[in-house]
Image (spheres, coloured by chain):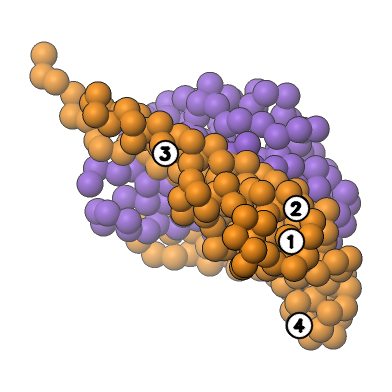
Amino acid sequence: MPKPVRTKAGMKTTVTGDLRNGICVDCNIHMKVQKVWIDTKREVDGNTVVTPKLLDRPVCPKCGGMIGQLIVRITPIKSPAPPECLKCIWRFLKESIFVALLSAYHARRVAYAQSNRPENKEILERYRTGEPSPKTIWQAIHANIKLKCPICRKYDKDPLLFRR
Amino acid sequence: MAQTETWTDTGIAELILLLREEAASGMESIVGLVDTDTCVAAAASTFADPAEAATHAVANGLELAAIDTVGGDTVNTAGDTITFDHVFTATGAINIVGIHVCNNDDDVAFIECCFNALLAMANTDTLTIDGQSTIDQA
């Protein structure tokens, strides 16, 4: 029996999401949910078929905009690939520690941004967008400590380096 | 908790049915998952039984709906990716922990995604979902 062909990565799925409030990002006034014609799109036989549908959307009474202020953006985190050799185990361990720290940071960031909605309090933009995200274990440790420290968050200072 | 997303076993089975031209339907619907705490996406989850104690939202704008945009894209090889975009508009307070991306018959969840934190949505809040799935042979 022939050996099955293994793809390198299989099925990869990425989902991102923006949570926004009902205050117009341009006019800073409360929007109202109303039925709006929205073009829904599907690809059929290589062509994009547009079907208008009546859907609920928040609409700004002043400018007609439908975009609210960003509360928080959720961040997908890629889990480390399983080790395929003995030498790769150390790299896998390092990547696993990094992913654990990064996950803790983003979970805490999303909760923090939600408890400080833009209509109530101004916080650092990085905690709403998740960018820049820590790239190394060291950066992730710093980011977690900074996010836990209210004074460091307020003055945008790294508690270990005493700078941004 | 990391955000987790996965194709479900039933989703892969539905995909194989589509390839075999058996009775099946493509990606068409999306629904929010509600729970009191975060969940972890599992391949064993089904449309009727989402991850952990999560259930499908049935009100406040996060209930089952047709996805706004479903399209094709290219990541590595031509046409290897499906993209889906959707905007949920909350019409009341609701706690969302993830989403299910479902078929047109609304009986199979292709993809389950659990967010890295519970999203507490208030009336008029919007949640814009932007997703893509690639079958990679690169």
Question: On the image, numbered disc 1 is attached to which residue?
Answer: A153
Of badges 2 and 3, the one in the foreground is 2
Of badges 4 and 1, the one in the foreground is 1
Same chain for labels 2 and 4? Say yes or no.
yes
Seen in the picture, residue A59 relative to B55 is either above or below; the reply is: below
Residue drawn 34% across the image and 36% down it: A91
Question: On the image, numbered disc 2 is attached to which residue?
Answer: A149
The numbered mark, 3 or 4, whose residue comes first in the sequence reads 4
Q: Position of residue B55 (x, y in %)?
A: 73, 30
The numbered mark, 2 or 3, whose residue comes first in the sequence reads 3
Of badges 1 and 3, the one in the foreground is 1
Mark pair 2, 4: CA separation: 32 Å
Please name the amino acid that badge 3 sits on: Glu
Same chain for labels 1 and 2? Say yes or no.
yes
Question: On the image, numbered disc 4 is attached to which residue?
Answer: A26
Give the left or right position of residue B126, taking residue A102 as reference. right
The chain identifier of the residue carrying mark 3 reads A
